[in-house]
């Protein structure tokens, strides 16, 4: 490499890093201006910049893989509906189509063309979760997508800077939270505007007329880096099966993973057929979380973009639970979609066991509540509240470390602070703490789940829109590690509630939720005694479990 080519490589790398900082500021703008707590407090969003062919150049670090990797394909759908040559400065496009967006109606996706000196140079896209968009609410009870809320096809939200007020009126009229929903749409638009402004500043600084050369550098280097990691893996075909709770009966997730000279492919042939209820997964969401699982093990250091994703191929049979076509109900697609990294890990564990964790709680245990007594009155003069409190279980133990407790993996969404929940809804969270012994025992212990107790602050009934898993089929351990504790949903009286479906919590009753723990890894008797004593002192492991499972005698405490 001569000096000039070396300097050019450095210049390209600097611009690539700058591009990542641009989209990170884009995402931070969205998080700081969003109205919904699940976005503002928990980071349930994504943001990215795309070239004029709809290929993702860079994604923000803040955000979820389900949003980012499915949004990576949604921009191409926008371009099919709105050709580049017909776009104008100030235009904004919107959809929440589950099959062209990020998997369900609660995620609004906005795409904004970015112009510099009158020329379109890039596209910015972002998505965030709106807590309520009408219909039966955020739960798996629906039997078709039109029951689940307002359905926005590919539309133009703004034309040359002028917002479509008719569309905004339709959004406001189809939600129990008109102020929050309208505000969230504005926050999405502002997020893309910031991205456009910062990109133009960058291009001015580096005297770029277009991004073609930089895009080629990013894609080529990312693809090369991922392929270099794939080359280190043993070639072969690896299979794994996972049984999960499902809605009304257990479901089988079946994967065949192939590592060859062309990359990695995952085929879900044999997976259970689609459900009548809203736990179905559109193919884009299946691809998103499968690719994320592969990236975590195979190439965790390579930035996520069209180049790095190009070596992963995913297929799920038409009509299966992982490729449910329109008009399937898909509102709670995260329940199954977020299990897919664990399914993929079960295949990769056979090839590179030293890199793969045990199974975890995986899917979020979002506590979605709804009822009368909200602090704000909507345009229909009702008094309603709707809130989604993000709650997490434990992750699986890692090859050289314990699992993480009360942590969302693979979604990455943070838990909602109790103070925020109580400030926006008439609820009292009486208890929120880690569950002793819920992490699977092992040389490396699984992460712990949580126990929460919640009741009405105004002595009124409220609804729980349950969408949980790992109740009947908890996370499995690996290499001698024990399974994590299953989750449960019940009343303080002892009455058990269903893990899925809308249910009423009577006035005066207290809801008790146990989130699942992650699986352990390795023989529990091989656990470091100092770590075990610290677990006991911290209340993570009980003395009884230490004695019966870990073989730690009382005199060793």
Image (cartoon, rainbow, N blue to C red):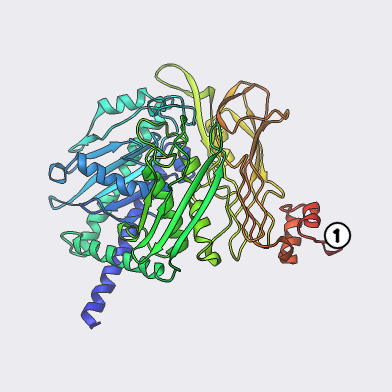
Q: Residue furthest right?
A: 555
Between 65 and 337, the one lying in front of the other is 337
Of residues 377 and 149, the one drawn nearer to the viewer in this rendering = 149
x 23%, y 82%: residue:
3
Q: Quadrant of residue 203?
A: bottom left
Query: For mark 1, what is the residue?
Result: 554
- Helix, strand or loop at mark 1: helix
Height in image: 448 above or below 526? above
Q: Nearer the viewer, residue 90 or 234?
A: 234
Quadrant of the drawing holding the N terminus: bottom left
Can residue 409 be seen at all in this image of the molecule? Answer: no
Dividing the picture into quadrants, the one containing residue 458 is: top right
Determine the residue positioned at 28% across, 62% down.
219
Residue drawn where x is 47% and y is 62% of the image? 297
* Quadrant that contains the C terminus: bottom right
Q: Compared to 409, does 151 lie above or below?
A: above
């Amino acid at each position: 490499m001569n000096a000039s080519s070396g300097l050019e490589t450095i210049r390209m790398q600097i611009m690539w890093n700058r591009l990542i900082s641009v989209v990170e500021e884009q995402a931070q703008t969205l998080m700081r201006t969003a109205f919904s707590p699940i976005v503002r407090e928990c980071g349930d969003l994504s943001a990215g910049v795309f070239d004029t062919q709809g290929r993702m150049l860079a994604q923000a670090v803040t955000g979820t893989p389900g949003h980012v990797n499915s949004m990576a394909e949604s921009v191409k759908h926008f371009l099919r509906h709105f050709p580049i040559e017909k776009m104008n400065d100030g235009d904004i496009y919107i959809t929440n189509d589950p099959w062209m967006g990020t998997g369900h109606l609660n995620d609004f996706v906005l795409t904004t063309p970015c112009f510099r000196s009158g020329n379109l140079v890039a596209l910015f896209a972002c998505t965030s979760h709106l807590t309520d968009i009408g219909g039966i609410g955020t739960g798996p009870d629906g039997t078709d997508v039109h029951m689940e809320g307002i359905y926005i096809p590919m539309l133009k939200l703004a034309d040359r800077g002028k917002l479509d007020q008719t569309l905004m009126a339709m959004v406001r009229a189809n939600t129990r939270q008109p102020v929050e929903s309208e505000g969230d749409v504005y926050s999405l638009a502002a997020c893309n505007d910031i991205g456009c402004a910062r990109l133009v500043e960058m291009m001015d600084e580096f005297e770029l007329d277009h991004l073609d050369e930089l895009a080629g550098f990013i894609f080529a280097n990312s693809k090369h880096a991922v392929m270099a990691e794939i080359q280190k893996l043993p070639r072969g075909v690896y299979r794994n099966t996972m049984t999960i709770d499902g809605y009304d009966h257990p479901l089988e997730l079946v994967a065949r993973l192939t590592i060859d000279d062309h990359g990695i492919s995952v085929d879900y042939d044999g997976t259970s057929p689609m459900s009548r209820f809203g736990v179905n997964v559109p193919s884009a969401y299946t691809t998103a979380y499968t690719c994320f699982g592969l990236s975590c093990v195979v190439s965790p250091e390579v930035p996520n973009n069209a180049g790095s994703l190009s070596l992963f191929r995913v297929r799920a049979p038409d009509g299966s639970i992982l490729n449910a076509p329109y008009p399937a109900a898909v509102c709670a697609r995260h329940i199954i979609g977020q299990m897919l990294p664990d399914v993929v890990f079960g295949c990769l564990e056979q090839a590179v066991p030293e890199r793969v964790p045990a199974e975890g709680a995986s899917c979020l245990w979002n506590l979605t509540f709804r009822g009368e007594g909200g602090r704000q009155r909507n345009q229909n003069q009702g008094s309603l509240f709707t809130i989604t409190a993000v709650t997490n279980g434990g992750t699986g133990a890692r090859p050289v470390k314990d699992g993480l407790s009360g942590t969302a993996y693979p979604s990455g969404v943070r838990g909602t602070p109790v103070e925020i929940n109580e400030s926006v809804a008439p609820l009292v969270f009486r208890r929120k703490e880690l569950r002793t012994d819920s992490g699977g025992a092992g040389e490396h212990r699984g992460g712990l789940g949580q126990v929460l107790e919640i009741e009405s602050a105004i002595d009124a009934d409220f609804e729980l829109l349950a969408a949980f898993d790992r109740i009947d089929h908890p996370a499995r351990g690996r290499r001698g590690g024990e399974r994590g504790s299953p989750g449960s949903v019940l009343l303080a009286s002892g009455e058990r509630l269903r893990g899925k479906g809308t249910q009423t919590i009577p006035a005066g009753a207290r809801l008790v939720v146990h989130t699942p723990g992650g699986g352990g890894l390795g023989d529990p008797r091989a656990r470091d005694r100092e770590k075990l004593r610290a677990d006991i002192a911290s209340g993570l492991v009980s003395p009884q479990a230490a004695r019966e499972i870990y073989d730690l005698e009382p005199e060793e405490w």
